[in-house]
């Protein structure tokens, strides 16, 4: 599956960082088409984002908008939680263990 993103001048650094980890299939001055992350790549992207600061599902989904669905993000977080790599805090935010 590929992900299509319109280029924006004001892309955040975090979004660019995430997109740099994905394989670009096609690019021109207006559009970048890249492969969607597989489950393991998505887990690593989530871990990288959560290393910076704890985030709730809505925040994570907004950073990964157009790259991964909320359902895929939720499943990846559940898997990471089962493996003891992330935890759900009392305020509803996910945190990478060891970075709280």
Image (cartoon, grey):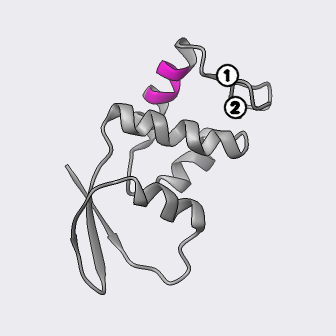
Query: Compared with residue 80, is residue 36 higher up or lower down, i.e. above or below?
Result: below
Q: The magenta stretch spans which residues?
A: 76-80
- Decide: few, some or many residues near mark 1? Use Cα within 10 Å; few <14, some 14-19, many ≥20: many
Give the residue number, with chain letter if any, for mark 1: 87
Q: Quadrant of the C terminus?
A: top right
Q: How many marks?
A: 2
Magenta highlight: main SS: helix
Residue 83, magenta (yes or no): no
Relative placement, left or right, of 32 versus 96 is left
Residue 18 x/y as whole percent: 47, 55
Identify the residue at horizontal 52%, vertical 22% (top origin): 80
Identify the residue at horizontal 46%, vertical 80% (top origin): 8
Distance (Cα) linking label 1 and label 2: 5 Å
Identify the residue at horizontal 47%, vertical 19% (top origin): 79
Residue 61 x/y as whole percent: 52, 48
Relative placement, left or right, of 18 versus 24 is right
Would residue 65 be seen by someone viewing this image from the given angle? no
Quarter of the image holding residue 93? top right
Relative placement, left or right, of 30 versus 82 is left
Identify the residue at horizontal 57%, vertical 42% (top origin): 48
Give the residue number, with chain letter if any, for mark 2: 95
Q: Are marks 1 and 2 in contact (CB under 8 Å)?
A: yes
**Mark 1 vs 2, N-terminal side:** 1
- Decide: few, some or many residues near mark 2? Use Cα within 10 Å; few <14, some 14-19, many ≥20: many
Residue 29 x/y as whole percent: 30, 87
Relative placement, left or right, of 30 versus 78 is left
Query: Compared with residue 38, is residue 64 higher up or lower down, i.e. above or below?
Result: below
SS under mark 2: strand
């Amino acid at each position: 599956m590929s992900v299509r993103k319109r280029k924006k001048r004001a892309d955040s650094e975090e979004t660019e960082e995430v997109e740099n980890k994905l394989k670009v299939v096609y690019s021109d001055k207006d559009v970048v088409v890249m492969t969607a992350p597989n489950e393991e790549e998505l887990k690593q992207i989530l871990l990288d984002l959560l290393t910076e600061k704890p985030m709730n599902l809505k925040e994570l989904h907004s950073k990964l908008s157009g790259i991964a669905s909320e359902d895929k993000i939720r499943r990846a977080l559940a898997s990471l939680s089962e493996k003891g790599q992330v935890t759900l805090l009392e305020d509803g935010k996910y945190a990478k263990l060891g970075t709280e």
